[in-house]
Image (cartoon, rainbow, N blue to C red):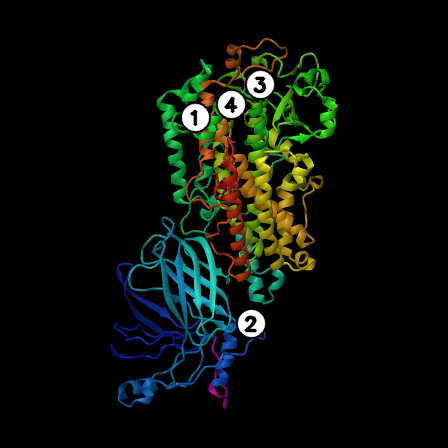
């Protein structure tokens, strides 16, 4: 055919002028020629390109017109055949009507050459999705408008070819390349395209994104935020994506309407759910047991295997023969601990830190670390010469709270205050009687209680509280700088005085009373009493860091994230609800295991119990952790601390719990209207079963649910998860630098054994008990890093990724945000009247997830 003429094209592809030669037609097995179309696309991505496309969807998929059959009837039959067996007979809609129009060339006889060509060109063989028409009647195109939004992250754009296929109730569109003049899919771009189909597809069910090689460019990553499709009738379909797409692959997206498995009936959609979960479980192939008695964790070695698997990439990488090999655990210049480097190299792109967050974390660490290194603090061993020297460690990283702690750390009222509003505000239990292992008598504390009351009276009034560190009684100890370290398991009795202040009454540094375990009192010498309180603060550090912080927020939230990724598809309402609260959790925990928990990591370098003690504390803590401990209001009631005044952690936490509960209640009520809707959701039951098995090790005595039977049970479980992933983590993490920068308030180790007699402590012996200089500096560096949330933050209630597209959940989100704003305003107003403001549960300062 001469260049510059027209040629018949299959429905779904518009006419173009051919500007280059056409390859010879190849006869298919059915004997019908395949039709190729050469289309000039202009300057795409800076190069002149010519795209050749084969029209049709398969060989031998067409059907011949029956004698006497009207073309319109066969059109409808072919649409049904093109839809595939999963849609035949299932569509609730009649086929869309298509007005019959004639081509302009047939109306105007001023183009005889064009009319002749149209009438004499042989049509192609009908593919499964093609509609036969009389050769003289051109196809009527249904035009879908596609709007693609690329994320604004660094490196979010792509140079790869992106094509789409729309799948509807009546069939699917041809695969169409999204290509315009200029750069496509740049970071932060919103670009519009048209997809032409031979007929309307009805309600859209799926959108397939095809990412393929462009020219000779290497594969790259693309962050697709979302895609909006406008149908010919004006109906708008939102397809949330919000994920990195790597390599060359096809990704299927569903519209944003959340649906449980019970609400899907089409075989196509049920099959899509199944295949999506199979792919996700192939990615997160298995849970890993980090240590006996630990919650299950993500196995990052599977990501390395994926990168070396032909199924996942075009190139192979070398895989370590033994994934447990510690050869990659080594020192790096400038770091005081070993780092498990291989575990940080392979991370699935949708759970790793963004480039912004990674850069921010590095720049938070370098100035503080470099400053200590240049001053020789990280390498200096030995005792501190005087307490005031500790002030100069972080001379440029002081906060109002850290300065307040430095001034008031040795006061009894501040010692008690920290049990309410410090970084470990979960230790107190109200007493109705004194335990036998703490034989405090009325004579011991009478001078402190004053006239008109006694020990028994205060017990009956509910004014006596106990902090019991029993879990440390059998904790193994460790050596630092070649010296043996020591641990105590103290009992601390506190009294709520008439002024509303919580005051320490008595401290016993072991779980066994006796002559070698004296009960220290505020009436003892100043140095004896200060040393006893410092031992309690050391126990606070160990229990807080290992159990309250890392176990009960980091590790449990990792288990929630893993179960969500493995058991719930993207369209599931619980997945949409929880996904923002799992952001970066797997990444930060992987970093922690590579730098803190690894052999000769930072825990081994700065704590008196070392890594072995950490493993003991966490496994023991999990064995005693219950559903009551996990649910914030239940925990407060069980500990008997609802009436303590000035308990800002409790007051702010209850407000945030109520806001989360109200929000989740609306979501659950919308998608789960009955008990049966919960019980019959097999994906939901698999999710809670995974959590019970891997987070709580199938321990029935924990009280955690292994299945959910009612919307009320689901509401409580989801509220607890969101609260612990956000508010609880903020409460126990954000103040670490504030309360720990003054080292004697949170010593990580003790170099002398607990005193067995009174009257022996001096300033010299006190300094010889505190951690050495390099141990102190390494620990404070950690405090500084974990207290500074890197950039790329998303505060509680902030959902920039619009996974929910229905009006009802969007209204619930707006109401949730409004309620959090009011809570924030109330907190800031209250803090104006406090000597030491409590802002750790101010909603704008709470991260949505455990991400640092």
Task: Give the answer, above or below, for where 294 lies relative to 72.
Answer: above
Q: Quadrant of the N terminus?
A: bottom left
Residue 703 in the image: x percent, y percent?
Answer: 70, 42
For disc 2, the marked residue is 87
Q: CA distance from mark 4 to mark 3?
A: 26 Å
For disc 3, the marked residue is 486
Element marked by disc 4:
helix
| Image quadrant in which you'd find residue 622 | top right
Q: Which mark is residue 36?
A: none
Dominant secondary structure, magenta:
loop
Asked whether residue 69 is drawn in magenta, I would say yes
Task: Give the answer, above or below, for where 685 lies relative to 837.
Answer: below
Label 4 or label 2, whichever comes before in sequence order: 2
Label 3 or label 1, whichever comes before in sequence order: 1
665 sits left or right of 58 in the view: right
Tags 3 and 1 touching, CB below 8 Å: no
Magenta part of the protein: which range? 61-71
For disc 4, the marked residue is 408
Element marked by disc 3:
loop
Residue 765 in the image: x percent, y percent?
Answer: 53, 11
Q: CA distance from mark 1 to mark 2?
A: 62 Å
Tags 1 and 4 touching, CB below 8 Å: no
Q: Nearer the viewer, mark 3 or mark 2?
A: 3
Residue 560 in the image: x percent, y percent?
Answer: 58, 45
Residue 696 in the image: x percent, y percent?
Answer: 64, 41
């Amino acid at each position: 055919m001469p260049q510059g003429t027209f040629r018949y094209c299959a429905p779904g592809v518009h006419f173009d002028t051919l500007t280059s030669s056409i390859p010879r037609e190849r006869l298919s097995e059915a004997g019908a020629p395949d039709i190729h179309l050469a289309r000039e696309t202009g300057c795409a991505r800076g190069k002149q390109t010519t795209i050749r496309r084969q029209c049709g969807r398969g060989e031998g998929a067409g059907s011949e017109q029956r004698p006497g059959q009207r073309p319109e009837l066969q059109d409808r039959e072919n649409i049904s055949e093109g839809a595939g067996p999963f849609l035949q007979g299932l569509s609730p809609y009649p086929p869309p009507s298509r007005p019959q129009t004639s081509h302009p060339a047939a109306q105007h006889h001023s183009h005889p050459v064009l009319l002749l060509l149209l009438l004499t060109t042989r049509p192609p063989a009908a593919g499964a999705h093609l509609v036969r028409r009389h050769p003289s009647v051109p196809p009527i195109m249904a035009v879908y408008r596609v709007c693609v939004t690329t994320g604004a992250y660094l490196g979010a754009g792509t140079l790869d070819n992106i094509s789409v296929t729309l799948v509807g109730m009546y069939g699917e569109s041809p695969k169409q390349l999204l290509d315009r003049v200029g750069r496509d899919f740049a970071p932060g771009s919103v670009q519009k395209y048209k997809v032409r189909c031979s007929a309307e597809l009805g309600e859209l069910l799926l959108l397939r994104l095809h990412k393929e090689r462009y020219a000779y460019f290497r594969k790259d990553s693309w962050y697709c935020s979302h895609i909006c499709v406008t149908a010919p009738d004006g109906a708008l379909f939102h397809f949330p994506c919000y994920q990195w797409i790597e390599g060359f692959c096809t990704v299927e997206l569903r519209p944003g309407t959340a649906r449980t498995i019970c609400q899907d009936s089409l075989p196509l959609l049920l099959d899509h759910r199944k295949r999506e979960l199979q792919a996700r479980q192939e990615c997160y192939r298995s849970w890993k047991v980090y240590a006996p008695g630990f919650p299950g964790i993500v196995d990052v070695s599977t990501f390395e295997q994926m990168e070396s698997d032909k199924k996942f990439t075009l190139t192979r990488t070398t895989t370590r023969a033994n994934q447990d090999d510690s050869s990659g655990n080594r020192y790096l210049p400038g770091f005081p601990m070993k780092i498990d480097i291989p575990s940080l190299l392979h991370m699935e792109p949708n759970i790793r830190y963004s480039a912004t967050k990674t850069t921010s974390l590095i720049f938070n660490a370098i100035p503080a670390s470099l400053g200590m290194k240049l001053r020789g603090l990280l390498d200096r061993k030995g005792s501190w010469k005087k307490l005031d020297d500790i002030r100069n460690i972080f001379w440029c990283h002081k906060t109002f709270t850290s300065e307040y702690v430095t001034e008031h750390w040795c006061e009894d009222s501040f010692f008690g205050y920290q049990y309410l509003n410090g970084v470990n505000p979960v230790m107190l239990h109200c007493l109705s009687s004194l335990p036998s292992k703490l034989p405090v008598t009325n004579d011991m504390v009478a001078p402190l209680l004053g006239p008109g009351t006694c020990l028994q009276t205060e017990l009956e009034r509910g004014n006596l509280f106990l902090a019991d560190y029993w879990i440390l009684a059998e904790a193994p100890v460790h050596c630092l700088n070649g010296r043996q370290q020591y641990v105590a398991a103290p009992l601390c009795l506190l009294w709520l005085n008439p002024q509303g202040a919580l005051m320490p009454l008595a401290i016993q540094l072991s779980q066994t009373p006796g002559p070698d375990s004296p009960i220290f009192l505020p009436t003892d010498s100043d140095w004896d009493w200060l040393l006893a309180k410092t031992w309690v603060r050391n126990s606070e550090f160990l229990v807080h860091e290992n159990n309250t912080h890392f176990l009960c927020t980091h590790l449990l939230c990792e288990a929630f994230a893993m179960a969500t990724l493995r058991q719930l598809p993207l369209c599931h309402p619980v997945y949409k609800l929880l996904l923002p609260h799992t952001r970066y959790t797997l990444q930060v925990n992987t970093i922690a295991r590579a730098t803190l928990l690894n052999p000769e990591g930072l825990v081994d370098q700065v704590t008196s119990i070392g890594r072995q003690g950490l493993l003991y504390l966490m496994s023991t803590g999990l064995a005693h952790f219950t559903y009551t401990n996990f649910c914030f209001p239940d925990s407060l009631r069980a500990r008997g601390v609802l009436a303590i005044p000035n308990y800002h952690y409790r007051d702010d936490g209850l407000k945030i719990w109520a806001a989360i509960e109200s929000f989740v209640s609306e979501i659950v009520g919308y998608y789960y209207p009955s008990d049966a809707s919960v019980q019959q959701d097999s994906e939901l039951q698999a999710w809670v079963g995974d959590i019970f098995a891997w987070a709580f090790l199938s321990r029935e005595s924990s009280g955690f649910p292994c299945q959910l039977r009612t919307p009320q049970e689901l509401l409580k479980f989801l509220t607890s998860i969101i609260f612990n992933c956000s508010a609880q983590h903020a409460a126990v993490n954000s103040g670490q630098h504030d309360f720990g920068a003054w080292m004697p308030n949170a010593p990580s180790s003790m170099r002398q054994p607990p005193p067995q007699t009174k009257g022996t402590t001096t300033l010299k012996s006190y300094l010889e008990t505190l951690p050495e200089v390099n141990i102190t500096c390494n620990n404070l560096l950690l405090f500084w890093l974990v207290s500074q949330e890197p950039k790329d933050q998303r505060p509680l209630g902030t959902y920039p990724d619009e996974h929910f597209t229905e009006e009802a959940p969007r209204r619930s989100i707006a109401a949730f945000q409004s309620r959090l704003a009011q809570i924030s305003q109330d907190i800031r107003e209250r803090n104006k009247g406090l000597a030491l403001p409590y802002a750790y549960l101010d909603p704008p300062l709470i991260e949505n997830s455990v991400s640092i």
